[in-house]
Image: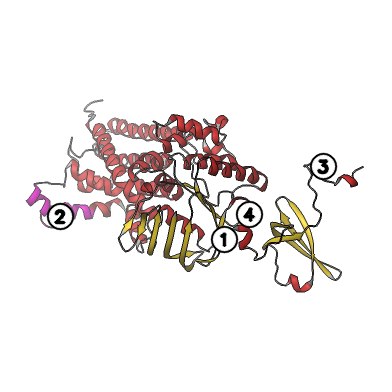
Amino acid sequence: MITVDIRKKFASDGREFSLDVKMEVAQNAFVALYGKSGSGKTTLLRMIAGLLEPDDGVITVDGVAWHDKGESINLAPQKRGVGMVFQDYALFPNMTVFENIVYAAGKNNMDWVRRLVEAANLGSLQSRNPAELSGGEKQRVAVARALARKPGLLLLDEPMSALDVESRAGLQDELLAMHREFGLTTIMVTHELSEVFKMATDVFILEAGRVLRRGKPSGVYSDQNPAGQFRFAGEISAIEKQDVVYVVSVIVGNTIVKVMAAEEEISSFSVGDKVLLISKAFNPHIVKPGLELPFYNRN
Amino acid sequence: MPGFDFGPIFLTVKLATAATVILFLVGLPMAHWLARTSFKYKFLTEALVAMPLVLPPSVLGFYLLVAFGPGYGLGKILADYFNVRLLFTFWGLLVGSVIYSLPFMVQPLQSGFSALPNSLAEASYTLGKSRLETFLRVVLPNIRSAALSGVVLTFAHTVGEFGVVLMIGGNIPGETRVASVAIYEEVEAMRYANANSYALFLVAVSFAVLAAAYFINKRGIKVA
């Protein structure tokens, strides 16, 4: 169990914010910190890692104080036993993939290093330099390296933001598999709704340094959740007027969905907005990829 | 070559090596601090470090001459309490060279540190590595080419030093008579052959050191 109750003044894009967050994270949870840039989610993650000191408050992990202003406790990042994946992955350019992981695990833990290499599917990349890797490969190395010291807590700072949409889905699955296999508690910073829905067991929505809402992803973005309802997270790519109605194009995954909307609905939308596409489906069809057309429509 | 003395050449190499080693050790923490600090008056520190780049060597030499003089101030304290004399000695020359070549070490190192993302060191800390281990195994290897530039420029600049040496070192054989000063003296005495030998040596050393540096850098690790 992780308990966080901290305050911190911070600057983002030249503006001053004050962060004031209370949160609890259960063992083995996969928590998403969701919010726009400047909402304080990365600042919060860095304070949990010990890379940034809160102005005031307490962070305890399984009953141990990592930070306690009143008691003048502030554990160094070296002593916190967290694994962290940075937004730029921070792989050491002077070491190969294998050496990056050995640096973290220590030379006496070669069996563990080999298991990590296998779990992260890095076998063929071991002797490459980080500069020779694709974004997705770098991410897999960064995760393997972060797990090298067998941390109980894995911190991910927008781990998919540098990747293209196609490579995300596979890596999300791999990350979830690792989370389960190694019995981790994971906190992930993200501004992608689709990631929240796919991966997180709990989500904290941050805005201007405060927790706006918290809960299960399915419940937190909408109060009611009737059965038979489909929902997809997406982003508005275009809004066009056609006769009396508007057609809103929404990017969901790697497809574009066009939805009609009335003028009064349009007023609150603009291109680039993250939205939820919700639909009541009375008669959904399940087909395998490549057989998208329902049976009765195929020739 | 009548009367040719290899002393100035050895002295030049000795002085440049000592100044480079000292400046590397002093320059690393200094450049690291300059690259990472948000200190309000950082610009003043940077201006001070860069001063030897723009000042005529004779200006620096003049003030060092005044400071090292045993009559008063720093020179008097050193002479009275530590029995150390810096004026017209090798040690004075070394102190002068360290000040004179400071920007040639600090500036390349500083830009090397600045170009390195902070997240590399932070990642190493979260992996349980101490600040020292992180510095030696992650930071330093990744600013290798900046460090090499600093070392080469400092060495070459100290070899080529003339004005400061003349002001505070004079021309004492075996003590302060470096190659650049020897050339001046040989020309004054019309011994052009000897002057040419020293000059050729300086040309050869400068070229060899620079060529070696560029060669090593070419094969160096590419920082992603």
Lower position in the chain sequence, tag 3 or tag 1:
1
Secondary structure type for disc 2:
helix
Q: Are marks 2 and 1 on the same chain?
A: no
- Residue at the spot 79% in from the left edge and 44% down from the top edge: A287
Lower position in the chain sequence, tag 4 or tag 3:
4
Q: Verify whether residue B70 appears in magenta.
A: yes
Q: Tell me the amino acid under the disc marked 1.
A: Gly
Q: Hey, which quadrant is residue B14 in on the image?
A: top left
Q: Tell me the amino acid under the disc marked 4.
A: Phe
Q: Are marks 4 and 3 in contact (CB under 8 Å)?
A: no
**Gap between marks 4 and 3, in whole Å?**
26 Å
- Residue at the spot 22% in from the left edge and 55% down from the top edge: B63
Mark 3 or 2, which is nearer the eye? 3
| Magenta highlight range | B62-83
**Residue position marked by numbered label 2 in the rendering:** B74
**Gap between marks 3 and 2, in whole Å?**
89 Å
Q: Chain of mark 3?
A: A
Q: Is residue A267 above or below residue A295?
A: below
**Residue position marked by numbered label 1 in the rendering:** A215
Say left or right for A273 vs A151. Answer: right
Say left or right for A265 vs A68. Answer: right
Q: What is the crowding at mark 1: few (fewer than 14 residues within 10 Å), some, or many (at least 20)?
A: some
Q: Are marks 3 and 2 in contact (CB under 8 Å)?
A: no
Mark 3 or 1, which is nearer the eye? 1
**Residue position marked by numbered label 4 in the rendering:** A197
